[in-house]
Image (tube, rainbow, N blue to C red):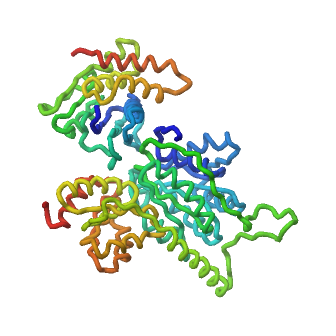
Amino acid sequence: MSKNWNFVFAGFGGQGILFSGKVTAYTGLIDSREVSWLPSYGPEMRGGTANCSVCLAEEPIGSPLVINPDALVVMNNPSYDKFISTVIPGGVAVVDSALVAHESGRTDITEVRIPATKLAQDNGIGKLANLIMLGALYKATNFTSLDSIRKAVEKCVPPTKPQLVELNMKAIEIGVNYQA
Amino acid sequence: MAERVLMKGNEALAEAAIRAGCRHFFGYPITPQTELAAYMSKKMPKIGGTYLQAESEVAAINMVLGAAAAGVRAMTSSSSPGISLKTEGISYIAGSDLPCLIVNVERGGPGLGGIQPAQSDYWQATRALGHGDFHVLVFAPSSIQELVDMVFRAFELAEKYRMPSMILSDGLMGQMMEPVSFPEVEVHTYDKPWAACGHQNKRTHNVVNSLYLKPDQLEKIVRERFARYETVKAEEQRAEEYLCDDAEYIVMAFGASSRISKSAVDIARSKGIKAGLLRPVMLWPFPEKYVRKYVGQAKGFLSVEMNMGQMVDDIRLAVEGRVPVEFYGRTGGMIPTPAEVAEKLSAMAGGVK
């Protein structure tokens, strides 16, 4: 857990890519690490591609732009094609297999395939595939503790909608408990 | 200590400005600065302040001129093309000796350019933010916390020296979230006996003006202003030194590119190259005193910028030809990588050691 983590979260706009990145960044704040969160920005919109870089570190962060992630969380084919080759050897890719059909053939990384979007629909939490993916990322990397994730979710959910905390945690647990 | 929260640079800057006593914001939307104006639009009406989306950048900066003339803390923010539009008003503000804060969240140029981060307005900020003989104070934050702290200082120094302050941010600093806290600090303001805020029949009129038709009178006023600039140069140069003590190769970079350069210096050190980072915290006044400290010691300077090479001119002026000064940069919205900068350092040091 006490290592430096560079993450890339990528997918379509509207999938909550930036939100799951923000929850990840908040775990760093709760764990007293150095943190940065950098979104792609521009003409992207719902349906366009979106991604963000998240760094968690023990020392001040230099470049907040992650070029070679330790772990990639990816939720569409274009982003998979764009980023899968950038994952460092020995790194992790968490892939939403309900949306990503492409395969890279890389054998030097651990690829976790989880049908997050389908699992979200089956469980009646259609918009929370992003947090199922976050649960799978946690399981694959142990980058923080579940307790810190819960506290991070509490920080990220609007204060006017506290009921979303349990719903978000349910999604994360689906990701943690998923057996391929 | 105040709680640390994650905030985007643009939003943190807006919150800091409010805490520094700014109650008057005039702006016009432009990427990648818009979150700053949006934050102001939400907060200002709740605290009795003014948020005004003007009909244009030109209108917004002239509203700042009016508010500043009345002696209140006023600001505007924009991104590169919008700042170009504001330059006429900035020159008038400087020519009227008014304090204010102008924020440039830079994007690629020239023209409409792009919307990704760049540092290609260095020359504009430090040389010619409008017509005429004048300078503005230019601050270059490299983290969101430093950005917050600078907002207070930018307002203070603007009032102290009666000149505009500019915070030169960029798309990366504006969009990035980092932990930030807002310590309770006492806001220091200066008396403004010059303010045109109503004489109540108790004093003579205050006139705020930048028009002087008699050349000898205008020359006198410009010379007085430049005497003040000399004080600023003597008192306000600021730079951060990282591993410079024994450095043979000194990287200079500001804002976003300084973070990348710091990582590059670490890579170079791990290869046995004695590299250090000298980061200007203020771009005007340029920290030439700091540069000169290393002239006898350094075998070379390397300026790393997100442009085609602008600050490199100031480094060359400061070293006066006594040390080679090289440049590495990316432009148009491209962000240099630490590996690229480290490679350049290796080349300067005579290949990988």
The part of the image, by quadrant, that contains residue A129 is: top left
Q: Is residue B230 above or below residue A148?
A: below
All told, the count of numbered labels is 0
Q: Is residue B234 left or right of residue B323?
A: right
Image height of A46 relative to A64, above or below: above
Query: At 20% from the left edge and 54% from the top edge, which residue is drawn?
Result: B270
Task: Give the residue furthest to the bottom.
Answer: B216
Percent position (x, y) of residue B170? 43, 54
Question: Residue sitting at 40 percent across and 19 percent down?
Answer: A169
Q: Position of residue B45 (x, y in %)?
A: 67, 42
- Locate residue B66 relative to residue A45 in the image: left or right: right
The spot of residue B140 in percent (x, y) is: 45, 59
- Tell me the quadrant of the picture where the C terminus of chain B can be found: bottom left
Is any part of residue A46 visible from this angle? no
Q: Residue at x 63, y 53 (%)?
A: B187
User: Is A149 rendered above or below residue B188?
Assistant: above
**Quarter of image, res A108:** top left
x and y, in percent, of residue A2 in the image: 29, 34
* A37 relative to B325, above or below: above
Q: Nearer the viewer, residue B333 or B311?
A: B311
Q: Is residue B75 visible?
A: yes
Q: Nearer the viewer, residue B211 or A134?
A: A134
Image-quadrant location for residue B162: bottom right
Residue B86 vs residue B168, the one in the foreground: B168
Q: Residue at x 16, y 32 (%)?
A: A109
